[in-house]
Image: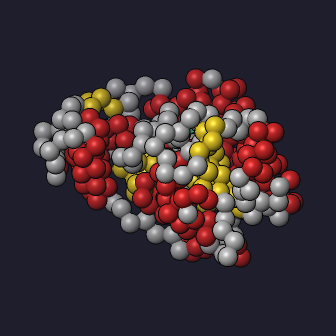
Amino acid sequence: MKHDRILIIGAGGQIGAVLSEALREVHGTDNVIASDLRQLDGHSGPTEILDALDASALEAAVKKWRVNQIYHLAAILSATGEKDPMRAWDINMRSLFNVLETSRICNLKKVYFPSSIAVFGREAAHRNTPQYEVLIPETVYGISKVAGENWANYYYRRYGLDVRSMRYPGIIGYQSMPGGGTTDYAVDIYHYAVQQKPYECFLTQDTSLPMLYMPDAIRATLELMEAPANRLSVRTSYNLAGMSFTPAEIAASISKQVPGFRITYKPDFRQAIADSWPASIDDSAARNDWGWKPEFDLDAMTKDMLHHLALKYGLKEVV
Ligand code: NAD
Ligand code: SER
């Protein structure tokens, strides 16, 4: 049986670091090539330094490793993007075009391109935001994801390239640190809590956002990529939901495990970004088409996060 060979772009990031190892478990260590701008350490399989803005280097890597799938995770996220919008647009779009064109030219089997809840803006329904909703994002990151989703759909319809995508909510995990998003507080807070430190949150206490625990996010990605093509009715990007909570609610969940945990609030520019995003997401298309179902709720995630971070910091168990 011919194995799939996968190139991950942006494998050094929050999601890529975890997804690389998960893909290696499924496809075999040597069949997953983890790439990023910088040298990747601690990987069990092959790695490559690759700038996704360099189209010839990307094509050369695809040929060198005889790749037949690309997972394109490299992007500038919402908060970092607002600091230099033109740079964010250039990186997010040019890297995606290079991936789509290389995949078309080299006749690749499948491409994965994550989108985000950042595609939505204030005009969208705030709660239970539907799959097909008005998309007027307020960040350059969100604009690049809306454009990216439409290009993914274009390459599928025009060239038959099997591009698959889902709109991740804020992703929370203990294995890696987030890379400049608006939902990053929900990772940082656990690192403070486990070390018995108070946390100053950059969002207000009542800002509800959609979130997803890393094991669910990884499983969703694998399930979407393995689903039969004829089950997929959405070729832009699937809505995906896990849980929704506010900073006050995550602090309360932590307090059950870490008595006396303290949180204060000092909203910054990320508040306006969060205010433009949905509070919760309707992911019924993903559930119906490929059987998506999250496993972790807030308290289950808190317990698991604190357990693993305590081990990571060499601390006595907090739970
Ligand atoms: P991250 O910022 O942690 O990692 C991105 C990685 O891409 C970094 O390691 C960076 O070095 C690399 N990179 C940047 N420019 C590159 C280039 N030109 N060539 C090669 N590599 C480059 O991001 P993440 O949180 O792991 O997100 C991965 C993907 O998932 C992104 O597309 C992001 O938009 C999407 N997403 C993430 C979240 C989340 O909460 N983490 C939510 C929604 C969508
Ligand atoms: N977690 C991401 C961000 O905050 C959402 O795409 O930018």
Number of numbered labels in the structure image:
0
Tell me if 239 is positioned left or right of 211 in this view: right
| The quarter of the displayed image where residue 75 is located | top right
Q: Is there any visible trace of residue 191 in the rendered image? A: yes
In this view, the residue in front, 262 or 275, is 262
Residue depicted at x 55% and y 29%: 80
In this view, the residue in front, 256 or 92, is 92
Tell me if 23 is positioned left or right of 235 in this view: left
| The quarter of the displayed image where residue 69 is located | bottom right
Q: Is there any visible trace of residue 117 in the rendered image? A: no
Residue depicted at x 75% and y 64%: 109
Horizontal and vertical percent position of residue 83: 58, 23
| The quarter of the displayed image where residue 314 is located | top left
Horizontal and vertical percent position of residue 114: 61, 51
Residue depicted at x 38% and y 33%: 203
Instruction: Identify whether 92 is placed above or below 213.
Output: above
